[in-house]
Amino acid sequence: MAEFEVIKRYFAPLSATVDAPDVVLGIGDDCALISPPEGYDIALSSDTLVADVHFFSDANPEDIGHKALAVNLSDLAAMGATPAWFSLNISLPTTYAVDEWLKPFCAGMQALAQRYSIPLVGGDTTSGPLTITLQVAGWVPKGQGLRRSGARLNDRLYVTGDLGWPALGLDQLAQPKGMPLRCPDVVLQEAEIAYAVTRLVKPTPQLAFALKARDYLHSAIDISDGLTQDLQHILTASQLSAQLDVDALPVAAPLRLAGLNTYWRALNFGDEYQLLLTAPAAVEGTLLSIADEVGITLSGIGSLRRVTANGLSITAVDGAPIPVGGYHHL
Ligand code: ADP
Ligand code: MG
């Protein structure tokens, strides 16, 4: 199929079916035209997914489409930005049956795109090893973007949802591929297997909570590379240390009985797309009611401390150091 036919059949509908007043012109011209609302900053983020690095190339294309957009929306959530539009650069192997692959792939993206009313405004289509780069844009009131550097001394530390399921999910997918398991001492029930896989392949961006809570938060990050590593990013940017209440960490139920090594490997695996947040203690009640309202859990997992002469650290309540670990991209 010719490139322009692919664009017309699969990508243009994602531009046309969403009504977005900020998008003056979508797919079909040399550029898209965007008219940003007055008084807002534009939040821009982009993520590349490479087959067999970030997802298995034989995965369900609908899930791949979902995840490609979901991980980008998660970055907007972590900035407190309302999603506005997205673009897609895709490189497809010439050996692929284009229709069979692109139809479900676009359906996966479309479902999320419609939920957040964001049109696909443009992109590029080439052939080559399967690689997907999405860019998303959102709006955030001027100066209100949630920066990693915004955390303050004595802020409470919170996390949405529960952690560890994606690592357990990968073990389920990795088994037939002969990859070493991350959590070999964890045995899941049938229903837990399905849930763990869903949490890995169909993550939910925590936008509803982020947008309602934004004005009460000091800083936020989405957990893509692992709990301690992503926490470290906030600490480094804000020049603070953290005391983690390990007993308060919301971990997936099957991990509670696991050995310590497995426990931390799962928590530091990443691919969670839960939000790690800091806020003054005074707004705790407000944050908990927002979480309740949007139907998620929010856990207080520690607080931010002064950096001592020994340097920036993450310690447990008893003062024991917690080693930082997580996914490394390079
Ligand atoms: P140009 O040669 O001017 O770069 P193209 O022929 O690459 O234009 O693309 C034609 C139109 O289709 C442009 O508006 C472009 O943004 C859009 N487009 C191309 N590929 C994609 C894609 N993968 N997703 C969304 N829009 C796309
Ligand atoms: Mg082009």
Image (cartoon, rainbow, N blue to C red):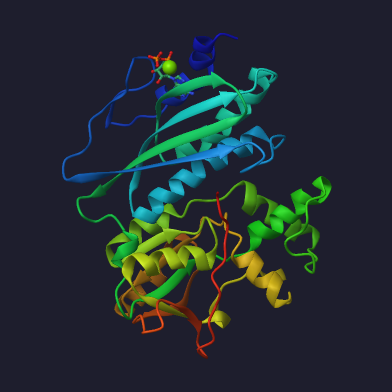
Residue at image location 65% in from the left, 61% down from the top: 165
Q: Is residue 139 left or right of residue 241?
A: left
Residue at image location 60% in from the left, 47% down from the top: 202
- Place of residue 298 in the rendered image (x, y in percent of width and height, measured from the top left): 47, 69
Q: Is residue 159 left or right of residue 79?
A: right
- Place of residue 191 in the rendered image (x, y in percent of width and height, measured from the top left): 75, 58
- Could you tell me which quadrant the N terminus lies in? top right
- Place of residue 232 in the rendered image (x, y in percent of width and height, measured from the top left): 45, 67
- Residue situated furthest left in the rendering: 38
The number of numbered badges drawn on the structure is 0
Residue 256 visible in the shown view:
no
- Place of residue 108 in the rendered image (x, y in percent of width and height, measured from the top left): 57, 35
Task: Find residue 144 and report its image quarter.
Answer: bottom left
Dividing the image into four quarters, tell me where ligand 1 lies. top left
- Residue situated furthest bottom in the rendering: 318
Residue 288 visible in the shown view:
yes
Task: Find residue 66 and report its image quarter.
Answer: top right
Residue at image location 54% in from the left, 78% down from the top: 322
Task: Find residue 180 and report its image quarter.
Answer: bottom right
Residue 110 vertical placement versus 204 (above, below): above
